[in-house]
Image: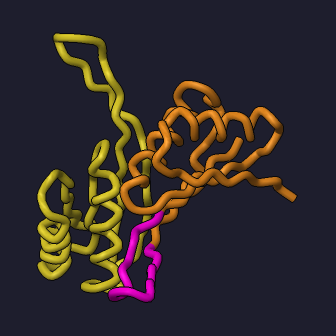
Chain colours: A orange, B yellow
Amino acid sequence: MVETGVVYIGKKPTMNYVLAVVTYFNDGIREVTVKARGRSISRAVDVAEIVRGRFIPDADVRDVRISTERLSSEEGPATSVSTIEIVLSK
Amino acid sequence: MVETGVVYIGKKPTMNYVLAVVTYFNDGIREVTVKARGRSISRAVDVAEIVRGRFIPDADVRDVRISTERLSSEEGPATSVSTIEIVLSK
């Protein structure tokens, strides 16, 4: 079984998330998925690229999935938001 | 030979780029690549998802590639920017 880690990208500085991914790999986790929605999608790509370029050169981008999530609330109509999942493995 | 179209995502409204992609497909082009850098990456994912969800339901996401581009200028140090390429085909 492959142990996997997941890092959700929010509004914090990019390097916080880079550190979270690097920590997973350094703890022996072989696969880390970086997930984001909406405007944070750009930051998710930054995180994956910084991890690979500067910290874990042997990490591969195994898959990139894009999708749409429906958000419904009690007030107003449902809206959609784009999502991304970047699977890094080594 | 597969004829391909390319749409570069910039700062214009999302629907402008959606229309550009849809126009390619309606003109008989079978594969359209949506490209973006930096903050426009989120918009590129929106464009691909809106095309598939609302306009061209039989378009598949054939590939999503992420990468880093080095930008060098005469003033100041070189900087890096993340890029995305989303290949849609039908």
Q: Quadrant of the N terminus of chain A?
A: bottom right
Q: Residue B26 at x, y = what percent?
A: 15, 82
Residue that appears at 57% across and 40% down: A17
Q: Residue A51 at x, y = what percent?
A: 57, 34
Q: Quadrant of residue B57?
A: bottom left
Residue B56 versus residue A28: which sits nearer the camera?
A: A28
Q: How many marks?
A: 0
Residue B35 versus residue B43: which sits nearer the camera?
A: B43
For residue A14: magenta?
no
Q: Residue B48 at x, y = what percent?
A: 32, 69
For residue A74: magenta?
yes
Residue that appears at 19% across and 59% down: B7
- Give the left or right position of residue A8, taking residue B53 as reference: right
Q: Quadrant of the C terminus of chain A?
A: top right
The vertical placement of A11 against B55, above or below, is above
Highlighted magenta segment, given as a residue range: A68-83
Residue that appears at 64% across and 30% down: A56
The vertical placement of B65 against B20, above or below, is above
The vertical placement of A87 against A69, above or below, is above
- Give the left or right position of residue B61, taking residue A64 as reference: left
Residue that appears at 14% across and 73% down: B19
Q: In the orientation shown, which residue stands out farthest toward the right? A: A1
- Give the left or right position of residue B52, taking residue B22 as reference: right
Q: Residue B22 at x, y = what percent?
A: 18, 76
